[in-house]
Image (tube, grey):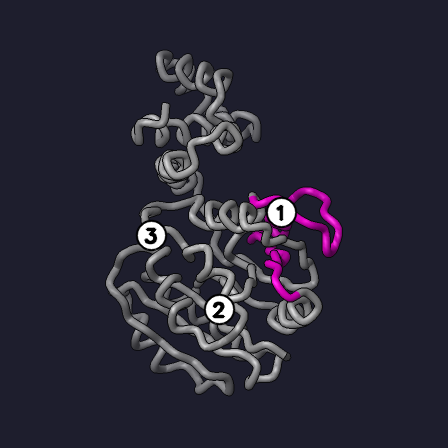
Amino acid sequence: MNKISVVIGTFNQKDKLKNTLLSLFKQTLSPASYEIIVVDSSSTDGTGQMIGSLPKPSCEFRYIVAENKGKTFARNQGIDQAQGEIIFLTDADMKADLNLLMEHQKAHAKSQNSAFEGLTINPDNKPYIKEKIKCSQKLKFSYFLSGNLSIKKDTLVSVGKFDEGFKGYGWEDIELGYRLFKYNVPLYYLPMAINYHDHPVTNEDMLKRKVDMGKSAAYFLKKHPNMEIKLFLGINPIAIAIFNYINKSPNILKYIADQSAKSPFFGYLLEEYYYRVGLREAGAI
């Protein structure tokens, strides 16, 4: 069986990272079959001390402190250090089901050069992927989501790993998935591999994320300036016209913001507006 290297990038997530690691220490997969690599982007919250206080894991465990150059840099450092044939990508705010790594390893034993996207459960106990997708169904590149994802290290390296030009929140994993799609690397759904996302996001934080996502989307489009990606990123005449109309009408924007707390539709509209604020600030619209 191929060995799995779990790669986690982190910055100032001490308490959530502790829960993530404890869940990974308890996997049903044989400790000899996996390793855990944490790349810390020079946290200032006592992450290093927390790591030192953890019970000694039975699997191999490495803690690396790196310069704070963002999530993509940290992940690439972990990939470079990995000794396993399979890279399992997750985040510092995920709690692993006991069988998580075993399910990913079993999937790779049956398919030699594929990527697998597991089932991620949000804090509201609903799946992150809301569409009805069957087990082993082939997925579009847009499902290449790195909170619960495995792929061969050689394959990642061959396409260039994560693009470190992504500095803010969003799209760095899907852009990598797009490159893999172009290299004909299939992505399959693996719902038996379960991860729990332990990171509720406030409405205010979500709007800040949407601005960052817009800026990252502009970088995505700059790398892949084609109509497929432009439409995928929501850069179309109708969406831009709605954004411009709201942007020129402060009273309408205030009404949307006031209604967003009690209406999912207006909440969605507000998030889409701030996403395009990011696109505009980055010069994409």
Q: Nearer the viewer, mark 3 or mark 2?
A: 3
Q: Is residue 50 above or below residue 247?
A: below
Q: Where residue 159 sits: x, y (%)? A: 46, 55
Residue at the spot x=56%, y=59% of the render? 149
Give the residue at mark 2. Answer: 20
Q: Main secondary structure of the magenta part?
A: loop
Who is closer to the viewer here, 254 or 228?
Answer: 228
Task: Please tell me which of labels 2 and 1 falls first in the chain.
Answer: 2
What whole-number distance in Å separates the C-alpha atoms at marks 3 and 2? 25 Å
Q: Residues within 10 Å of mark 3 (few under 14, many from 20)?
A: some
Residue at the spot x=50%, y=56% of the render? 146
Image check: 162 left or right of 34? left
Q: Nearer the viewer, mark 1 or mark 3?
A: 3
Task: Please tell me which of labels 3 and 2 falls first in the chain.
Answer: 2
Cβ–Cβ under 8 Å for marks 3 and 2: no
What whole-number distance in Å separates the C-alpha atoms at marks 2 and 1? 21 Å
Q: Is 198 one of the magenta-colored residues?
A: no
Q: Is residue 50 above or below residue 10?
A: below
Give the residue at mark 1. Answer: 129
Who is closer to the viewer here, 248 or 115?
Answer: 115
Amino acid type, callout 3: Glu
Image check: 75 left or right of 134? left
Q: Where residue 226 sits: x, y (%)? A: 47, 30
Q: Is 130 one of the magenta-colored residues?
A: yes
Residue at the spot x=41%, y=16% of the render? 246
Give the residue at mark 3. Answer: 164
Cβ–Cβ under 8 Å for marks 1 and 3: no
Q: Residues within 10 Å of mark 1 (few under 14, many from 20)?
A: some
Magenta segment range?
112-141
Q: Is residue 185 above or below residue 38?
A: above
Who is closer to the viewer here, 149 or 22?
Answer: 149
